[in-house]
Amino acid sequence: MGMPEIPDDSYLRRVVAVLGAFRAEDGEVGAAELARRTGLPKSTVHRITVALAEEGLLERQGSAMRLGLRLFEIGQRVPRQRVLRDAALPYMTDLREATRQTVHLAVLEGNEVVYVEILGTPGGPVMPSRVGGRLPAHATGVGKAILAYSPPPVTRAVLDGELARLSERSVIAPGLLARELAGIRRDGVAYDYEESGRGIVCAASPVLGPDGEVLGALSVSGWVNRMRPAGVAPAVHTAALALSRTLGHRDRPRTPSTGHVRAERGLQMAGIGP
Amino acid sequence: MGMPEIPDDSYLRRVVAVLGAFRAEDGEVGAAELARRTGLPKSTVHRITVALAEEGLLERQGSAMRLGLRLFEIGQRVPRQRVLRDAALPYMTDLREATRQTVHLAVLEGNEVVYVEILGTPGGPVMPSRVGGRLPAHATGVGKAILAYSPPPVTRAVLDGELARLSERSVIAPGLLARELAGIRRDGVAYDYEESGRGIVCAASPVLGPDGEVLGALSVSGWVNRMRPAGVAPAVHTAALALSRTLGHRDRPRTPSTGHVRAERGLQMAGIGP
DNA sequence: GAGTCGCGTCCCATGAGGTGGGACGCATCC
DNA sequence: GGATGCGTCCCACCTCATGGGACGCGACTC
């Protein structure tokens, strides 16, 4: 009866668990705290942190430790974010210049979006988003834009999963969300009316790759009483289309099932680099 | 005779070696290529990459693999870059606005600087620097600014180490470099006259923390015939001083040995928060 | 079409090394 | 002084990483 103590061990899993135990807010953390967060024996955490520090992935200041700079270096080499960010940055600055609002660039990972770059504005609202941070895809503008152009299995997984609410206006009804995604596919623009946070609205558009696959999304966000989503939508849409084109996209954005998709080749946007 | 085959194994070291084998330029890499770069047996690399993919640190597209988005997420949580970057960004945009040149933010790691943030300009030169990339500290403006305010042992290690040349004007004479660092301590500004790359000049100033310890450096770079380093120096110096003040620095920047240094507490800039 | 090369994958006997409960010293707090 | 938390270290057990080699595959060459 019952799982035999979870056979799911392996050294690497524990190491990653320790690294993942560091939260975005905290700087230095003690070994005991890490043991508590990971559920690993104190002794094991101690040994792992010592080993990680030897490799430079962790920095030890006496007995307190924090994530090492080497992790930042490696993280900046991740193609999914680097290629997209490098290509998108000029368009993002244009977008901020034109709209005077906060500009977001995000990609999808599972049921969530990961923010790759954010260009803020001096007087803008404090967004719940952080570079490298995650938010439920269904409750954000960028997330809905990506989901609308994702392969059916991906979209279905989100619709069938748990739809958490970020604010009282978050759309958490699967049917309603599915219908909204259809509308986004038709317009090429997704809206967020205070669904990700109080007082924050947003317009977003998908960024498509060479084979019509969605790579991420751009968005413009601002205070509900200082920005009209429909007003900035053309700018966001245009910027996303232009960015898609520089990334090699040829067709007009359509339903993923339409068009001549060469799915076998995958993203293969490897050689774009410097 | 000679080293007995390097007893220096350990699983973790190999795992980190595999992750480090990914270069900034390349997107997807094969297992055989990784084995070649790391010097590890093909069989070992295969097993490690499979394990890494299970943890999400690597993404496998068929048989090709690339660094996973999770590494980017973790990398963005590294305090050394996050706290500094968040605090510096406003000053950096001001600096770019005022000078219309490329602005750099970097920290020291060993004998090299790691670039934390770069604000480029449309018409500016292509710099050898990349966010998350490394360059020899002694051959860059930011590097010399940091070294000038670093603890003696750190500076000595660089002076005694190998001083590689990035260009024909790189300062690679230890004595000359030491004298230049003394001048930087006096002025609060470091210059780079085509020492890091052809046609590129730069002015840099150190960013100091609460206890007078150097956290990093700001710089402004541009074409040698379109920017006068001495002209932008006051702006860079001012921005660095202002940034240092927001980070809790109280005294005027002096030689690290001067002033009431409370070194025991270390950086401890943990709680500055999100 | 036979040969060759490089690739990713898988197997398996060996032993290196990760495991974790527990002990220890040390601070801090009541 | 007792209690609680911390980081560190030890050591007998046994899991699991090791890497040489075999295999199938596709892409070339002669």
Image: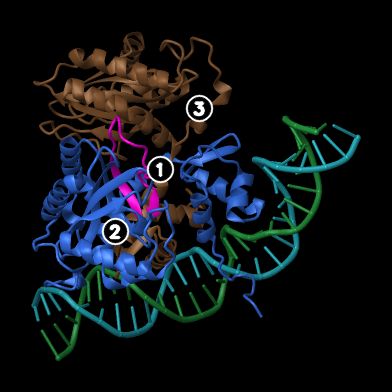
Chain colours: A blue, B brown, C green, D cyan
Which chain letter goes with mark 2? A
Q: Is A273 in front, or is A114?
A: A114
Q: Residue at x 37, y 33 (%)?
A: B86
Q: Which residue is mark 3?
A: B267
Kindly indicate the quadrant of the structure image that contains residue B144.
top left
Q: CA distance from mark 2 to mark 3?
A: 41 Å
- Is residue A65 within the magenta segment? no
Q: Amino acid at mark 1?
A: Arg
Q: Relative to A37, does residue B82 appear above or below in the rendering?
A: above
Report x, y in % for residue B218. Answer: 30, 24
Report the chain holding disc 1: A
In the image, is A98 to the left or to the right of B65?
left
How far apart marks 1 and 3 lie (CA) works out to 18 Å
Please tell me which residue lies in front, D2 or A48: D2
Judge by depth and name the residue closer to the eye, B157 or B60: B60
Q: Are marks 1 and 3 in contact (CB under 8 Å)?
A: no
As for residue A133 lying within the magenta part, the answer is yes
On the picture, is B179 further left or further right than B13?
left
Residue B82 location, quadrant: top left
Q: Residue at x 34, y 70 (%)?
A: A175
Question: Dot 3 surroundings within 10 Å: few (below 14), some, or many (20 or more)?
Answer: some
Span shown in magenta: A113-135
